[in-house]
Amino acid sequence: LAFITLSGGTQTPKWGRARAVPSIDGLGSPIDPLNPEAARDGIPGIRADIAATKWLSFSALALEGRYAPAIVSPIIPDWLDETTFALRANIDVGATNLSFGGIRKLGRSGDEQPAVFADFERYFKRVGIYGEWESEWIDDWKNAMTVGFKLSVPCRNDRMISCTGEYR
């Protein structure tokens, strides 16, 4: 039995695994590299999540644009003002999480920016590794990749000290 969740309003998608320097671009407000865990501003939009099984889920997202292009086109309605559409499939295989999908930005002037992405993360007891990749079409395919690790060490009072490192 699949579970479907629909939501509208302010969306704060956290697609991708990077915490400070993400490669998957255009799905959320900018991340503060000095405080990557801080709450981010949301973007108006709609979202649908489908949990097909315990190990497979799908998400669809439509976000309102943040930047109004100077050229107005009668072909694309006003509400499609740099609108972003995205689809994602997520697979859990044991302690490993994999996801892949596509992003398409539509501008009012008729321009389009398609992109494809993939990410993974694997956590062991105290060490985790993760990475993400995106290829976006801007006059040519532009690739971006981020890899990272997280190390958690137990300390007093059942607390953890965590250290994260990333490279883009």
Image: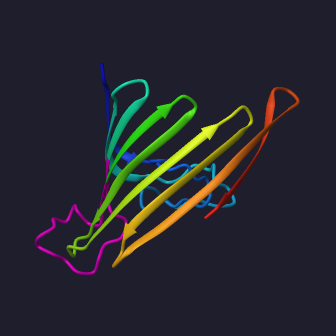
Could you say where residue 46 lies in the image, as x and y percent from the top left?
A: 30, 45
User: In this rendering, does residue 24 appear at all?
Assistant: no
> Which residue corresponds to the image point at 65% horizontal and 46% vertical from the top-left?
129
Q: Which residues are magenta?
A: 61-85
Looking at the figure, which quarter contains the N terminus?
A: top left
Q: Relative to residue 98, is residue 25 depicted above or below?
A: below
Q: Nearer the viewer, residue 121 or 51?
A: 121
Q: Nearer the viewer, residue 114 or 45?
A: 114
Find the residue positioned furthest to the left. 74
Image position of 42 (left or right of 47): right
Looking at the figure, which quarter contains the C terminus?
A: bottom right
Image position of 93 (left or right of 73): right
Q: Check if residue 62 falls in the magenta segment.
A: yes
Could you say where residue 2 lies in the image, as x and y percent from the top left?
A: 30, 23
Could you say where residue 33 lies in the image, as x and y percent from the top left?
A: 65, 61
User: In this rendering, does residue 45 appear at all?
Assistant: yes
- Residue 125 occupies which quadrant of the picture? top right
Mainly helix, strand or loop, the magenta region?
A: loop
Could you say where residue 132 lies in the image, as x and y percent from the top left?
A: 52, 54
Q: Relative to residue 58, is residue 134 depicted above or below?
A: below
Q: Nearer the viewer, residue 110 or 125?
A: 125
